[in-house]
Image (tube, rainbow, N blue to C red):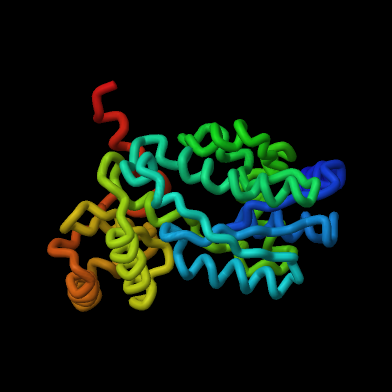
């Protein structure tokens, strides 16, 4: 693990100047901090603020940037203005990343820098259409190049004192909407409020999958039993109905990343 981190530092040094796609999640926070340590002012962390970016993640990104002295900018991206993105095809992430990298490459060009992202070695086998956009824009993935896995990034983050080291996996709010169901600002706000309600009730690892009038809750295995307690279940239903959901269901498979990709296997080619 230490050798991999040394390789990461060597890669960053060889790039000379970088613009980090910085969401504030486990991977990008670690990458941004190492880049700042290696390159100083030649490392810029850029956070893209948009309708699909949760407010909670924005606050965390700012907190880490301030705590570790990162050069940090927040820009506005408008993927929701793109008809292809709103249509929510299976490659929706491509259009989101295309919007993001359009902005980041312009910033990088002014700084004679390279755009880098937080993809790691564990992401290689996952369905990630956004990688196509990364290749088109020449984005580098230093964590992946150093063969760093998620568990190693978490441990290195813990050793570095990063508060993100044990954060649950994060993804944009649009990932809660089934493919081919239109992405709208109204849906995104409902999802965000629903997940805020769950966290206010004490749940740490959770997702609210949006199926029109139905909210399908994915809860971490260690918290599932609590969600089934009568008083807690009643509170969940009350809070989510107040947000606008008519039905509230608990997915017995529990929390898992990319669960909406399961539906891709059921659709005709």
- Depth order, front residue of 123/225: 123
Q: Residue at x 69, y 51 (%)?
A: 107
Residue 191 horizontal/vertical position (percent): 32, 62
- Depth order, front residue of 164/105: 105
* Quadrant of the image occupied by residue 235: bottom left
Residue 28 horizontal/vertical position (percent): 63, 54
Residue 142 horizontal/vertical position (percent): 72, 42
Q: Residue at x 60, y 49 (%)?
A: 103
Q: Residue at x 71, y 74 (%)?
A: 67
- Depth order, front residue of 105/202: 105
The answer to whether residue 63 is seen in the rendering is yes
The answer to whether residue 25 is seen in the rendering is no
Residue 245 shown left or right of residue 176 in the figure: left
- Depth order, front residue of 185/36: 185
- Is the C terminus in the top left, top right, bottom left or bottom right quadrant? top left
Residue 157 shown left or right of residue 101 in the figure: right
* Quadrant of the image occupied by residue 240: bottom left
The mark tally for this picture is 0
Q: Residue at x 53, y 41 (%)?
A: 98
Residue 84 horizontal/vertical position (percent): 37, 39
Q: Residue furthest left?
A: 246
Please determine whether, in this image, residue 180 is positioned above or below residue 29.
Answer: above
Please determine whether, in this image, residue 205 is positioned above or below residue 82.
Answer: below
């Amino acid at each position: 693990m230490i050798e991999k981190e040394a390789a990461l530092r060597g890669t960053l040094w060889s790039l000379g100047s970088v613009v980090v796609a910085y969401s504030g999640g486990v991977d990008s926070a670690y990458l941004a901090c190492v880049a700042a340590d290696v390159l100083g002012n030649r490392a810029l962390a850029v956070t893209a603020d948009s309708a699909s970016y949760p407010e909670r993640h924005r606050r965390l990104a700012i907190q880490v940037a301030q705590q570790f002295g990162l050069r940090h900018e927040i820009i506005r991206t408008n993927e929701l203005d793109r008809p292809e993105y709103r249509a929510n095809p299976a490659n929706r992430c491509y259009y989101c990343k295309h919007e993001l990298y359009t902005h980041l490459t312009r910033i990088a060009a002014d700084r004679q820098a390279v755009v880098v992202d937080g993809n790691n070695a564990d992401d290689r086998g996952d369905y990630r259409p956004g990688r196509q956009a990364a290749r088109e824009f020449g984005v580098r993935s230093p964590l992946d190049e150093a063969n760093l896995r998620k568990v190693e990034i978490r441990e290195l983050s813990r050793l570095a004192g990063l508060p993100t080291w044990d954060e649950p996996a994060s993804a944009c709010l649009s990932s809660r909407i089934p493919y081919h169901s239109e992405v709208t600002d109204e849906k995104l706000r409902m999802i965000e409020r629903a997940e805020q309600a769950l966290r206010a009730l004490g749940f740490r690892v959770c997702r609210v999958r949006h199926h029109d009038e139905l909210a399908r809750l994915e809860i971490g295995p260690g918290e599932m039993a609590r969600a089934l307690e009568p008083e807690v279940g009643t509170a969940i239903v009350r809070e989510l109905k107040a947000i606008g959901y008519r039905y509230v269901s608990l997915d017995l498979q529990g929390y898992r990343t990319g669960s909406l990709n399961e539906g891709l296997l059921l659709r005709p080619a």
